[in-house]
Every structure is written in C-alpha cells, then in structure tokens.
Amino acid sequence: MCHHVTMPKRPKDKPVPVSSDEAPPSPASVISQYMAQIGSKGGKIGGKRRLQTMTAKQRRDVAAKAAKARWSKSKKQSK
C-alpha cells in the first residue's frame, strides 16, 4: 500500500487592518521587552535565593574566589 497523497495546504491568515496613524509594534521589540522584564526579575530572585541556601563556609569560599579573581585581573592589567 503506497501513501502518496499530499497533505492539504492551510489557508493563509488574513492581515489585520491597521490604523494609518500608528504603526504596530514589531514582534521582535515586544518579545525583547518581555524577555528583559522576565530576565531582570529572575536575576533579582536568583541571588537572594542562592545566599539563603548557601552555608556560611560556602559564602566565604565564593567571596574568596571572587576577591582572588579581582586581584589577579588588576595585576595583569598593570603590566
């Protein structure tokens, strides 16, 4: 048995009439704004939650690693 019948094509959506006074926002800019809002919200929550779940020793280790990275960068730049 051979199946060589093609799928029917979908009808194309009709364009939505737009007022000539204002241009519709581009989908890329709307998506970009939405992702920026979501990203900033997640970043604000992430750091606080990370500190709550870490032990004091883990926080010290992270701080020491960050300080070491900062100092190593300043030495490389001054040469």
Image: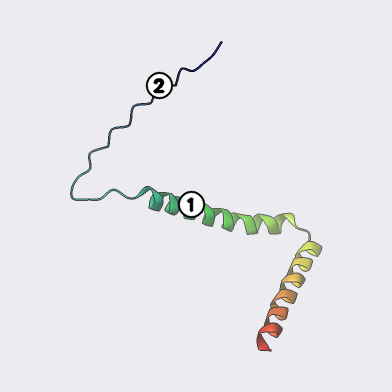
Q: Is residue 8 above or below residue 50?
A: above
| Mark 1: secondary structure | helix
Marks 2 and 1: which is nearer the front?
2
Q: Position of residue 4 (x, y in %)?
A: 49, 18
Few, some or many residues within 10 Å of mark 2 (<14, 14–19, 20+): few
| Mark 2: secondary structure | loop
| Residue with the most extreme bottom position | 79
Q: Amino acid at mark 2?
A: Pro
Question: Seen in the image, is 43 located left or right of residue 36?
Answer: right
Q: Residue at x 34, y 27 (%)?
A: 11
Question: Seen in the image, is 41 located left or right of residue 63?
Answer: left
Q: Residue at x 32, y 32 (%)?
A: 13
Q: Amino acid at mark 1?
A: Met
| Residue with the most extreme left position | 20
Q: Position of residue 55 (x, y in %)?
A: 78, 59
Q: Which residue is mark 2?
A: 8
Q: Residue at x 72, y 71 (%)?
A: 66
In three-dimensional space, the C-alpha distance between marks 2 and 1, rounded to whole angstroms, equals 36 Å
Asked if marks 2 and 1 touch (Cβ < 8 Å), the reply is no
Where is the C terminus found, in terms of image quarters?
bottom right
Q: Quadrant of residue 49?
A: bottom right
Q: Which residue is mark 1?
A: 35
Few, some or many residues within 10 Å of mark 1 (<14, 14–19, 20+): few
Question: Seen in the image, is 7 located left or right of residue 70?
Answer: left
Question: Looking at the image, which is closer to me, 48 or 70?
Answer: 70
Q: Position of residue 19 (x, y in %)?
A: 20, 45
Q: Is residue 42 above or below residue 10?
A: below
Q: Residue at x 26, y 37 (%)?
A: 16
Q: Is residue 55 above or below residue 72?
A: above
Question: Looking at the image, which is closer to me, 69 or 46?
Answer: 69
